[in-house]
Amino acid sequence: MREEIEVLATLQNIDRVIKEKNDTKQVILAEMQRWESEIEAKKIEVELHRQQWKEKEALRHDKERILQEESGKTVEKRMRMNRIKNIKELQALQREIDQIKQNNSVIEEELIKAMEALDTCAASLGEKEAEAKTLEETWATKRAELQLQLARVESEMVEVSKGRETLATQLTGELIGRYELIFSRRGGTAVVAVLDGICQGCFMNIPPQLYNEILKGERLHLCPSCNRILYYKQTSAPDKQA
């Protein structure tokens, strides 16, 4: 059993490397996801500004159309005035023309405001499009770097995992299963040494009887406090007899 636990300790070192590389992989993936989310948010922002620009452009076009139609009515009524001889009809028609002019003045003011709003919106849209383009160009470079890092980490994980598989063949499935359960529950530390009667996982004293059993190395023993797998670690070389 002593040899099996030593293999477990070696396996633990490998698993820690795999865990570290997997953590690095998750960080890279999270970074890539953050960039993708930022790009998507910027696209939505640009589309929102573009839609606002379209609405303001439609409003400007509508005001221009109304103004053109009303101006056409003014021209048409002025032409009618040349054919009317009745003073009352002329006065009534003039009032209509004056009313159209007044309405057109209001429409012209609204058109000016619409054009100013359109210019402001167009400028804002241009800024957002420029920001989106810069962000996408930056992301294109950053993505290539992250993909290279990700490929390297995954390749290293494959190589380390091959070594783990070879080492694991020396152990029973039951022993590995127990070890992996403790490893996952105890933050990547499943096998710990007992140094001077103290568990190096939780730093609690080991009962003397259990300590003696650990010294024999004949069976698998767990720490009564943290439930980690224990093995004896000698602090110094034993004294040699003369």
Image (tube, rainbow, N blue to C red):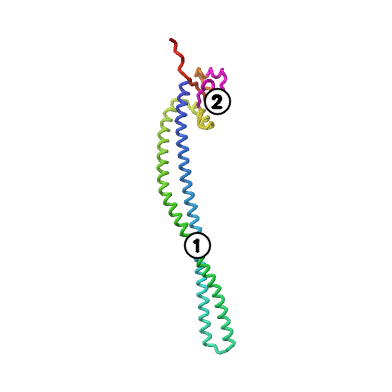
The structure residue drawn at horizontal position 52% and vertical position 32%, both measured from the top left corner, is 187
Image height of 107 relative to 81, above or below: above
**Quarter containing the C terminus:** top left
Q: Looking at the picture, which amino acid does disc 2 mark?
A: Phe
* Mark 2 or 1, nearer chain start: 1
Q: Residue furthest bottom?
A: 85
Instruction: Where is residue 94? Give x, y as percent.
Output: 56, 83
Instruction: Where is residue 84? Give x, y as percent.
Output: 54, 88
User: 178 or 65: nearer the eye?
Assistant: 65
Estimate the spatial distance between the alpha carbons at disc 2 and disc 1, rounded to whole Å.
66 Å
The structure residue drawn at horizontal position 52% and vertical position 87%, both measured from the top left corner, is 82
Image height of 63 relative to 47, above or below: below
- On whether residue 203 falls in the magenta region, the answer is yes
* For the residues bearing labels 2 and 1, Cβ distance under 8 angstroms: no
Instruction: Where is residue 144? Give x, y as percent.
Output: 40, 46
Name the image quarter holding residue 96: bottom right
The secondary structure type at the circle numbered 2 is loop
The structure residue drawn at horizontal position 50% and vertical position 59%, both measured from the top left corner, is 49
The residue identified by callout 1 is 121
Instruction: Where is residue 115? Give x, y as percent.
Output: 50, 67
The structure residue drawn at horizontal position 47% and vertical position 38%, both measured from the top left corner, is 23
Q: Would you call the spot at circle 2 few (<14 residues within 10 Å), some (14-19), or many (20 or more)?
A: few
User: 7 or 200: nearer the eye?
Assistant: 200
* Region of the chain picked out in magenta, as a range: 191-213
Image height of 56 relative to 139, above or below: below
> Number of labelled discs?
2
User: 122 or 157: nearer the eye?
Assistant: 122
The secondary structure type at the circle numbered 1 is helix
The residue identified by callout 2 is 203
